[in-house]
Amino acid sequence: MSGFPWDAFAQNLALAAAAALAVMLATFAVAVRRGLHRIVDVAWGIGFTAVALVTFLASAGEGDYARRVLVTVLTSVWGLRLAAHIARRGRGHGEDPRYEALLAKAPGSRDLYALRVVYLLQGALVWLVSLPVQAAQYVPGPLTGLAWTGTALWAVGLFFEAVGDAQLARFKADPANRGRVMDRGLWSWTRHPNYFGDFCVWWGLFLLACDSAPSAAVSVVSPLVMSYLLINGSGKPMLERHMAERPGFRAYAERTSGFFPLPPRRRG
């Protein structure tokens, strides 16, 4: 097996950054025109898809073709599904309360403040978190059992995200559930099946980059950052602070795992 192509990969890092920035700037332009910054959440999945596609084109002649195709397809399926789900969920709604509260602190122009602290930050995170997607496509060796294990873990993650989102959407569509806490299906095993799914997706994509030691070393920051954000950062803690005052949430939290799926605890 030949060595890892550091020069080509370094060039790809710049191309991936440009792709992520282009997606965020285009989204910013649309958001300003519509006066609705919540659409930046749709750009999150699209940004990863753009990075995967740009890397696929840039890595031609460098990495293993089957791995390049697999990583690009897995990333695009995950990213486009997430973008479509968020777009459907936000249709007909006004500004997201999170962004409303953030932009209320703007020292000057709300739009320029949003560009700095939301769009450019998310673009940087897309670039950072996508490191396994980039590095895996430059691994010269063929797919191994480790890569297929990563693919299986990615599939588990997509299942939890897609099924959890569908179950929650059906629950919210029933007027009888207004104000109630979702505690059925996957949501009875973990309070955050979608976040757990995201966790699995990014550890799975990382394993696809682990057939090369240099690629693995470059990529490990991605699942570590995502794990932190989901478990301790802007994911689980922020949502649970919002849900804390909802009737029934405390009892739900006492019987349901906070992140990793476990059988519901029986009440004593």
Image: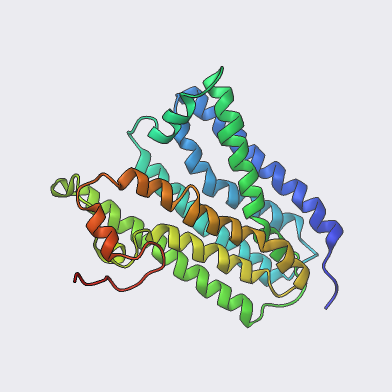
Residue 23 in the image: x percent, y percent? 60, 39
Asked if residue 202 can be seen in this view, the reply is yes
Residue 266, by quadrant, is: bottom left
Instruction: Specify whether 245 is left or right of 140.
Output: left
Question: Which of the 4 quarters of the picture holds residue 245?
Answer: top left
Residue at x 38%, y 47% (from the top left corner) = 239
For the point 50% across and 66% down, which residue is it? Answer: 200
Residue at position x 50%, y 29% from top?
A: 31
Instruction: Please name the residue shown 57% across and 66% down the image.
Output: 203
Name the residue nearer the viewer: 151 or 112. 112
Q: From where the camera sits, is residue 26 visible?
A: no
What is the x, y in percent for residue 232?
49, 54
Give 246 or 268, whichever is nearer the viewer. 268
**Residue 17 appears at what percent x and percent y?**
71, 45
Left or right: residue 135 versus residue 37 is: right
Label count reads 0
Classify the position of the C terminus by image quarter.
bottom left
Q: Along the line of sight, which residue is nearer the eye, 35 or 183?
A: 183
Image colouring: rainbow
Residue situated furthest top in the rendering: 108
Indicate the position of residue 59 as horizontal and vertical percent values.
76, 60
Image quarter of residue 209? bottom right
- Quadrant in the picture for the N terminus: bottom right
**Residue projecting furthest to the left:** 176
Q: Is residue 118 above or below residue 215?
A: above
Residue furthest to the bottom in view is 145
